[in-house]
């Protein structure tokens, strides 16, 4: 399976645009190479007060670490080709204003790079690495006396980077170049469309958030640029239909465009692209981006050094008291905040002491189209003047058959399936799970000496156990490709058996007792359990003496995860992978992706927010959802509506914390880097959110200070060099 590749933030597309415009008189002079190599602006921050005697960087003045940096006309042209059109078309700038803006941006970037070198040289980086002018000079000298200026600059920047950071930059550059060649090759491959009919991307079942997502910091030291000649390209994945001939032709087009855009110099060996000055210049750009990230990391570390346990506890306490006051008599304000909770937005206390607020996941097993039409044709029954058809609907409910909705995860352009052991419901024919990369390639790979050779490539999917096998059969064609899938139809009881069986199966991944109870032990609420639907609603009286519908009669089953009976659910751990709370949530969330036809509920944070007051939901659903919330997290109810069967599982409820001062307990030991760190626990997430507020403010302030201090006095623009560009 091919995961979508993330490309580096390099304007390689501009290479081709530059090649296409190389013959345009407005962008060229007689000697393109000479013209593009002229200096459009010079940057040197050493005239600032920090480099004067007594300044923090005084020892660096006059050294080779910080000196004149030239912004070439070539860089300005490429920047315009990458971004100028948007500035002119969408921001209303003139061409002259766009070039001025872009040149100022290039100057500001160079100011930041020079400041980063000075700051890291003086104070070290966030990980405690220290640097010296002697070490810097040695690193540059090791590039060789005959090395080009670009290669020497790359060596100097590399001095400040760790081996992993250099490998990451190199990997990103190789990916970007391969992607550029891929774009050329796609037009050369005759059989762009394969012989198989795939499910359209728009019809593929929604994927869980994070599925097959490549991490931003991923790199692979074995990844290589593919020109059509290499026998070993490492982890690069060739295009479908690629041949040696199509790749060589695509690479030649790529090289031709580089020449046209004055990116390659005559005499350079293009069979060894990574030894060219073009490659060195691109690597310099990557190194500069990495260096700026290191500077921000250093600023962030300095910003959080004073953010200790006492500080965090004080802010937490104030936040709790503030919400208590805010929500004491403001129902709409509370519900607005509660409906927007996230990893960075927390609600600690309910409105006015009303604890029957919570969240539920709704898994809808629907009536078929024909059943829906049949239901609409029924006459009213049980004397209800408002059009109720409860008894007739009950007869249809027995015929509802749910199916696993994940067939398109096999048949789309990407086949996300793999064979592995998981929960099968004792069906030996079920053997397929999904998103192998997200579960098997989410850790670093190291060599025998402990060096990382491949960083963790994929994000782990949160709140998703990943062990529920496809409930159906899979057919293959003669080439071994999936031809079709055939899901097994199951009744409501069949689904409940799957739900209970998979929850019990999850015991293997946690120490909790993850079974369901449907006995009379859950909060003294009468529980229902039906072996068949034969007598469901038969001869029932749906009305109280006052003539109103008794919606409790619609409840088909109620239960709760045994581990959480008696108020044992800990909301602090509901997002902490491996905890009983998160494992149970992950089971239900995965089953929702498998069976739920209420697609609006997929990838929601905790599901639907449920109020204890009148809602806009259908009355049967409202009653059952409110009941599930009263049961507390881990409780579930089963109820029908005119849409079909609803399995309603409570993911969070204030009922579980009604005897506490607040919904969550802040424990500094669980925070990132703490003595008992628990990733994604409430304390972990809350402290990260507190830090981000401080860090964002401090870092942006320091970045602004650098530009205010240095930008105006550190740059010299050479307008005569680029004045011809302003007349485009």
Image: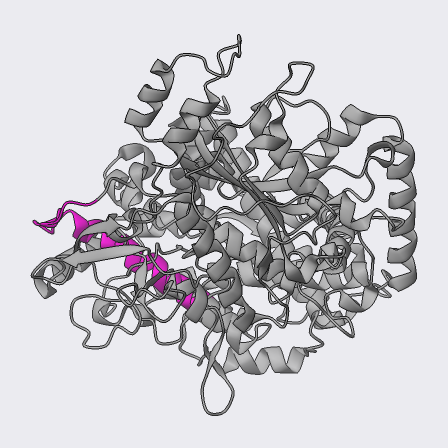
> Which is nearer the eye, 524 or 160?
524
- Look at 76% across and 55% down and name the residue there: 567
Task: Work out which quarter of the rendered image holds the C terminus and state it.
Answer: top left
Residue at the limit of the structure toward the bottom, as seen here: 448
User: Is residue 422 shown left or right of residue 541?
Assistant: left
Q: Is residue 305 visible?
A: yes
Picture coordinates of residue 106 (x, y %)?
A: 54, 46
Picture coordinates of residue 29 (x, y %)?
A: 30, 41
The answer to whether residue 82 is above or below residue 152 is above
Identify the image quadrant of residue 510.
bottom right
Give yes or no for residue 174 being in the magenta stretch.
yes
Q: Is residue 149 visible?
A: no
Picture coordinates of residue 460 (x, y %)?
A: 50, 62
Identify the image quadrant of residue 68.
bottom right
Identify the image quadrant of residue 221.
bottom left
Query: How many numbered circles are shown?
Result: 0
- Look at 26% across and 45% down and name the residue there: 19
> Which is nearer the eye, 699 or 373?
373
Q: Main secondary structure of the magenta part?
A: helix
Magenta stretch, residue numbers: 169-198
Picture coordinates of residue 112 (x, y %)?
A: 64, 54
User: Is residue 163 shown left or right of residue 477?
Assistant: right
Task: Work out which quarter of the rendered image holds the N terminus and state it.
Answer: bottom left
- Look at 36% across and 47% down and name the residue there: 35
> Which is nearer the eye, 522 or 663?
522
Give yes or no for residue 50 being in the magenta stretch.
no
User: Is residue 637 shown left or right of residue 29?
Assistant: right
């Amino acid at each position: 399976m091919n995961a979508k590749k993330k490309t580096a933030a390099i304007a390689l597309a501009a290479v081709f645009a530059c090649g296409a415009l190389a013959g345009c008189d407005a962008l060229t002079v007689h000697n393109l190479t000479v013209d593009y190599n002229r200096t459009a602006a010079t940057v040197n921050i050493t005239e600032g007060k920090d480099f004067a005697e007594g300044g923090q960087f005084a020892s660096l003045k006059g050294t080779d670490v910080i000196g004149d940096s030239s912004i070439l006309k070539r860089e300005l042209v490429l920047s315009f080709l990458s971004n100028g059109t948007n500035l002119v078309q969408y921001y209303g700038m003139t061409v002259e204003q766009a070039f001025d803006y872009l040149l100022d941006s290039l100057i500001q970037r160079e100011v930041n790079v020079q400041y980063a070198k000075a700051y890291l040289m003086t104070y070290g980086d966030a990980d405690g690495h220290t640097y010296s002018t002697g070490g810097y000079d040695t690193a540059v000298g090791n590039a060789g006396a005959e090395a080009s200026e670009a290669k020497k600059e790359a060596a100097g920047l590399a001095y400040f980077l760790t081996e992993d950071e250099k490998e990451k930059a190199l990997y990103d550059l190789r990916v970007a170049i391969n992607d550029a060649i891929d774009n050329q090759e796609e037009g050369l491959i005759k059989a762009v469309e394969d012989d198989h009919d795939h499910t359209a991307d728009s019809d593929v079942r929604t994927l869980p958030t994070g599925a097959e997502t490549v991490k931003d910091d991923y790199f692979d030291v074995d990844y290589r640029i593919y020109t059509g000649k290499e026998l070993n390209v490492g982890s690069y994945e060739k295009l479908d239909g690629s041949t040696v001939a199509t790749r060589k032709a695509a690479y030649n087009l790529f090289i031709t465009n580089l020449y046209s855009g004055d990116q390659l110099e005559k005499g350079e060996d293009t069979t060894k692209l990574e030894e060219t000055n073009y490659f060195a210049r691109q690597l310099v750009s990557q190194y500069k981006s990495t260096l700026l990230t290191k500077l921000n990391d250093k600023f962030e570390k300095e910003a959080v050094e004073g953010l200790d346990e006492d500080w965090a506890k004080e802010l937490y306490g104030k936040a709790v008291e503030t919400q208590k006051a805010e929500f004491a008599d403001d129902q709409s304000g509370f519900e607005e905040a509660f409906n927007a909770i996230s990893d960075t937005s927390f609600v600690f206390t309910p409105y006015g002491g009303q604890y029957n607020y919570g969240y539920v996941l709704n898994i809808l097993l629907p009536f078929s189209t024909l059943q829906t039409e049949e239901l609409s044709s029924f006459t009213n029954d049980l004397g209800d003047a408002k059009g109720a058809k409860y008894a007739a609907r009950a007869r249809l409910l027995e015929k509802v058959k749910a199916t696993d909705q994940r067939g398109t995860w096999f048949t789309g352009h990407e086949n996300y399936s793999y064979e592995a052991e998981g929960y099968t419901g004792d069906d030996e024919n079920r053997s397929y799970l999904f998103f192998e990369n997200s579960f098997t390639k989410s850790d670093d790979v190291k060599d025998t000496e402990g060096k990382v050779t491949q960083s963790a490539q994929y994000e782990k999917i949160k709140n998703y156990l990943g062990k529920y096998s496809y409930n159906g059969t899979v057919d293959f064609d003669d080439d071994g490709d999936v031809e079709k899938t055939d899901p097994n139809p199951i009744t409501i009881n069949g689904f409940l058996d799957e739900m209970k069986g998979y929850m019990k199966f999850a015991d293997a991944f946690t120490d909790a007792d993850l079974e369901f109870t449907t006995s009379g032990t859950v909060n003294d609420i009468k529980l229902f359990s039906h072996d068949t639907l034969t007598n469901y609603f038969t001869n029932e009286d749906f009305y109280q003496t006052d003539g109103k519908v008794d919606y409790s009669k619609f409840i088909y089953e109620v239960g709760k995860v045994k581990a959480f009976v008696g108020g044992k659910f800990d909301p602090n751990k509901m997002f902490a992978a491996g905890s009983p709370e998160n494992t149970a949530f992950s089971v239900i969330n995965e089953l929702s992706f498998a069976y739920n036809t209420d697609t609006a509920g997929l990838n929601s944070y905790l599901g639907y927010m449920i109020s204890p007051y009148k809602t806009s939901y259908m009355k049967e659903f409202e009653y059952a959802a409110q009941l599930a919330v009263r049961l507390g997290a881990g409780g579930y109810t089963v109820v029908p509506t005119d849409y079909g069967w609803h399995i309603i599982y409570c993911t969070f409820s204030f009922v579980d914390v009604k005897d506490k001062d607040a919904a969550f307990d802040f424990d500094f030991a669980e925070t990132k880097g703490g003595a008992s760190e628990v990733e994604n626990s409430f304390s972990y997430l809350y402290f990260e959110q507190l830090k981000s507020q401080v860090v964002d403010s401090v870092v942006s302030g320091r970045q602004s200070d650098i530009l205010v201090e240095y930008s105006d006095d550190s740059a010299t623009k050479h307008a005569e060099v680029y004045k011809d560009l302003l007349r485009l």
